């Protein structure tokens, strides 16, 4: 099988009941991202930020993987060394579908981070600004998620993987947030074919060679079936 790098966004988990950000009724229509997704917002009002992520953690705990998560885990099981799953999502639905070694470039709801000393640990279900860090005891606990103005995780690994990709596929992401929105150009420059799977065309749709539109729970399993049947999986349908 070819080397495939798959970038996923909020659209992958939409049908599991987790809200997207920029769609009608998306999270950024209800909250100001400057308040809940920036280091400055956290410094101003840590209680509000914890409330936002506690609610998202609870939502995630009560959600289940959908057919698209299941299909990606199935694809990875068929060729673990060839499939790299990179996600902007902070949920753990890919892992709960059976995927392994998912590259969480925007962090994870299930992890906590000390804003004082950088220590990380498994997050409790409910976090509060007064929670002490288990390493340095400072009350500087924050969710281990990447905020605007912060550098995403695992970028060296992602860059290396994009360099040797034969196919780059973006699933359920609107193409508004960099560096993830630039991966399609990086992969194409390195010689990879590129395909977008999305409900609506993203802002970077014109940069992809192929586009398939529809809900992830339908179009992702269909695409995975094609790849597993030995088709190159990069054509429009
Ligand atoms: P967005 O909310 O910006 O985009 C969601 C995308 O999913 C859109 O292109 C929708 O068309 C698509 N979509 C919605 N429902 C779908 C479905 N059922 N099947 C397939 N696609 C569907 O979310 P992201 O692009 O993931 O970062 O957002 C990127 C980053 O912006 C997030 O990681 C988060 C956010 O601010 C931080 O918080 C740092």
Image: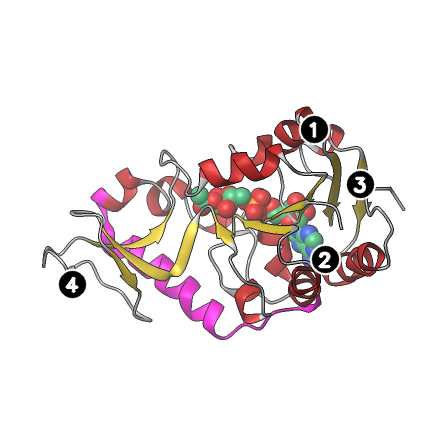
Mark drawn on residue 188: 1
Q: Secondary structure at mark 3?
A: strand
Of callouts 4 and 2, the N-terminal one: 4
Q: Residue furthest top?
A: 189
Q: Position of residue 191 (x, y in %)?
A: 72, 28
User: In front of the other: label 3 or label 1?
Assistant: 1
Residue bearing mark 2: 216
User: In front of the other: label 4 or label 2?
Assistant: 4
Residue bearing mark 3: 211
Q: CA distance from mark 1 to mark 2?
A: 23 Å
Residue bearing mark 4: 134
User: In front of the other: label 4 or label 1?
Assistant: 1
Of callouts 1 and 2, the N-terminal one: 1
Q: Secondary structure at mark 4?
A: loop
Of callouts 3 and 2, the N-terminal one: 3
Q: Secondary structure at mark 2?
A: helix
Q: Which residues are magenta?
A: 43-67
């Amino acid at each position: 099988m070819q080397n495939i790098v798959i970038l996923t966004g909020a659209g992958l988990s939409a049908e599991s009941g987790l809200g997207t950000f920029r769609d009608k009724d998306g999270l950024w229509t209800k909250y100001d991202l400057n308040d809940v997704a920036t280091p400055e917002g956290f410094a101003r009002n840590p209680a509000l930020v914890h409330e936002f992520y506690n609610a998202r953690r609870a939502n995630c705990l009560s959600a289940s993987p959908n057919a698209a998560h299941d299909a990606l885990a199935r694809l990875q099981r068929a060729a673990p060394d060839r499939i790299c799953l990179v996600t902007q999502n902070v949920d753990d639905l890919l892992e709960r579908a059976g995927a392994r070694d998912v590259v969480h470039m925007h962090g994870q709801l299930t992890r906590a981070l000390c804003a004082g000393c950088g220590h990380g640990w498994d997050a409790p279900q409910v976090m509060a600004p007064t929670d002490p860090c288990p390493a340095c005891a400072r009350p500087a606990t924050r969710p281990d998620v990447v905020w605007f103005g912060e550098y995403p995780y695992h970028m060296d690994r992602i860059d290396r993987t994009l360099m040797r990709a034969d196919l780059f596929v973006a699933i359920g992401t609107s193409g508004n947030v960099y560096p993830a929105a630039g991966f399609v150009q990086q992969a194409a420059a390195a010689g990879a074919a590129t395909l977008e799977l999305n409900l609506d065309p993203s802002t970077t749709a014109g940069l992809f060679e192929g586009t398939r539109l529809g809900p992830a729970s339908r179009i992702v399993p269909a695409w995975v079936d094609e790849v597993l049947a030995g088709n190159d999986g990069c054509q429009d349908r």
